[in-house]
């Protein structure tokens, strides 16, 4: 991957920077970035050595991204086995789901025990 590639953020710009700050002292591991949008956070984490799975429902919209996206839908079962990821990031994603309980159950299912889950939702009020 080209580390100089500029990837547009679909979310509030500062959220990705805050995640990098929060995890800077954590060990490198497996990451689920879902929904990943253009893949900026996935790209940055991959360049830092993380094994990243970047997911989105609109993978066809991000063909110019340096990150390979996996198709996944927050409203369906995530296409991953249980306890797969050390870190899960859901940046501005839950508001796109029909059932928040389902989304959080699925993240709980795919994250390893003791893993770190960071979620954000925009405040549109």
Image (spheres, helix red, strand yellow):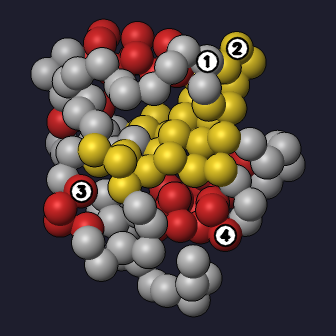
**Dots 1, 2 in contact, CB < 8 A:** yes
Q: Position of residue 61 (x, y in %)?
A: 17, 65
Q: Residue at x 20, y 16 (%)?
A: 99
Looking at this view, is 84 or 101 the one in front?
A: 84
Examine the rendering and report whether any part of residue 91 can be seen.
Answer: no
Q: Which residue is mark 1?
A: 83
Of pointers 1 and 4, the one earlier in the residue sequence:
4
Alpha carbons under labels 1 and 4: distance apart? 24 Å
Q: Residue at x 50, y 47 (%)?
A: 53
Label 3 sits on a secondary structure element that is: helix
Q: Residue at x 73, y 65 (%)?
A: 48
Of pointers 1 and 2, the one earlier in the residue sequence:
1
Of pointers 3 and 1, the one earlier in the residue sequence:
3
Alpha carbons under labels 3 and 4: distance apart? 20 Å
Looking at this view, is 74 or 60 the one in front?
A: 60
Q: Nearer the viewer, mark 1 or mark 2?
A: 1
| Residue 47 tag number | 4
Left or right, 119 with reference to 76:
right
**Dots 2, 4 in contact, CB < 8 A:** no
Q: Position of residue 74 (x, y in %)?
A: 26, 30
Which quarter of the picture shows residue 114? top right
For the N terminus, the quadrant is: bottom right
Q: Nearer the viewer, mark 3 or mark 2?
A: 3
Alpha carbons under labels 1 and 2: distance apart? 7 Å
Label 1 sits on a secondary structure element that is: loop
Left or right, 5 with reference to 69:
right
| Residue 113 tag number | 2
- Neighbours of disc 2 within 10 Å: few (<14), some (14-19), many (20+): few
**Dots 3, 2 in contact, CB < 8 A:** no
Q: Which residue is mark 3?
A: 59
Label 2 sits on a secondary structure element that is: strand
């Amino acid at each position: 991957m080209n580390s100089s590639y500029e990837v547009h953020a679909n979310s509030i710009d500062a959220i990705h920077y805050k995640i990098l700050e929060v995890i800077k002292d954590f060990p490198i591991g497996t990451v689920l970035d879902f929904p990943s949008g253009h893949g900026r956070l996935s790209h940055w984490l991959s360049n830092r050595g993380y094994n990243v799975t970047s997911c989105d429902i609109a993978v066809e919209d991000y063909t110019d991204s340096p990150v390979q996206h996996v198709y996944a839908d927050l409203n369906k079962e995530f296409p991953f086995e249980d306890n797969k990821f050390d870190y899960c990031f859901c940046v501005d994603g839950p508001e796109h789901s029909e059932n928040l309980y389902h989304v959080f159950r699925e993240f709980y299912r795919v994250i390893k025990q003791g893993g770190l889950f960071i979620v954000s939702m925009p405040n549109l009020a």
